[in-house]
Image (tube, rainbow, N blue to C red):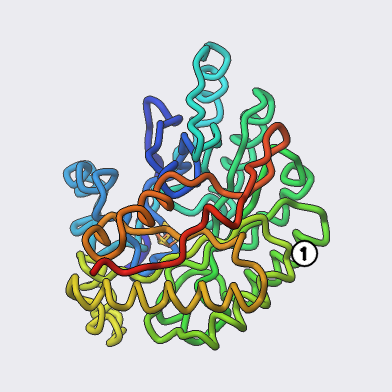
Amino acid sequence: MANITGREEIVNPLQKSSLNKKGLCDYVINVASGCLHGCTFCYVPSTPAIRTKQMQLKSKGVNDPQIEWGKYLFIRDEIPKKLDNILSRKKKWVSTLAGKGVVLLCSGTDPYQNQTTAKITREVIQILLKYDKRVRILTRSPLWLKDLDLLVHPNVTVGMSIPAINDELMKRIEPFAPPTSLRYQALLEGAAAGCRLYAAIAPTPPQMGFEDFLTHLGLLMQIKPEVLFWEPINARGTNGKRMLLAGLEFANSIMNKTSWAENFLRQWEQIEHASQVLGCMDLLHIWADRELEGVVDKDILNYWWYKPTVENWETEVFQYSDESRPILKRSS
Ligand code: SF4
């Protein structure tokens, strides 16, 4: 099936976000609906952003937005104009302790997946910086390197999702996204250019263990990241079905809540241990899933749900303290 592409209008592109619970932002802007990277685990098609648009998508030729995820993209090219208008009138700005008033591009698509979205993204960043807003880019594509003239800025941080630097394995999991080796190379180039950087080691497949985390963290430390987010793959919804359809048999091992939680905790212990060995534990930021309630001590979950990252934004530095960080403890 050929990709379905087009445009989409959106009334308000600047949306408040609950992703402060992941230490990411207080606002999100999605420059498109759909995503041509088509990652098999992607949770976006099962969120209201796509589920509430079934009829609209059908009228554009997308019959099953879940299963056809990765095959459609509707760009929102009016966003820059609308955003400028909104920000010129906006008086109040939400800035929570963990979200830090940051605007994330993007939570439901990849801002640099192709030249068209990259152009909209560039214009959006220019406008956000014009109004002194903090910007977080999250992408799987090295195309952001073309915007280094804008992105090397104290109010911008650029992150790439790199679950593992293993092109063969990741090609099976993220079939249409650029190879992870190229993503890593892009981060090295960004670091050399003086860009503020972070990485999302997410989502990690269950076959990764302590030695893999040790190697991976060691490589990522070369880019001098300000924070390293981590979470494992979740295969409990329709994304599990998509993973199995893509021939990813390992999804079977994390399909029910018990096996998923067991894998989560094993990898959590292993990546924490690896970061301890490498002396980068302060940078590791755990994205603790809400469904770990009852499995992990509530105090530990609360710590991760409300913790600001250790990133250094120009006007504020989160003071990290060794004493405040709990080590994973399972509920008895
Ligand atoms: S790049 Fe992000 S939004 Fe796009 S398919 Fe992959 S996980 Fe989903």
Q: Identify which residue, 148 or 207, lies in the foreground.
A: 207
Q: Identify which residue, 128 or 267, lies in the foreground.
A: 267
Whether residue 269 is situated above or below residue 138 in the rendered picture: below
Whether residue 182 is situated above or below residue 215 in the rendered picture: above
User: Which residue is drawn at the image coordinates 53% and 77% (left, top)?
Assistant: 273
Residue 324 location (% of width, % of height)? 53, 52
Helix, strand or loop under label 1? helix
Residue 14 location (% of width, % of height)? 45, 30
User: Which residue is drawn at the image coordinates 39% and 65% (left, top)?
Assistant: 38
> In this image, 39 relative to 156: left or right?
left
Give the residue number, with chain letter if any, for mark 1. 189
> In this image, 213 relative to 286: left or right?
right
Residue 16 location (% of width, % of height)? 40, 31
User: Which residue is drawn at the image coordinates 24% and 58% (left, top)?
Assistant: 293
> In this image, 45 relative to 19: left or right?
left
Image quadrant, ligand 1: bottom left
Residue 199 location (% of width, % of height)? 59, 62
Whether residue 47 is situated above or below residue 1 in the rendered picture: above
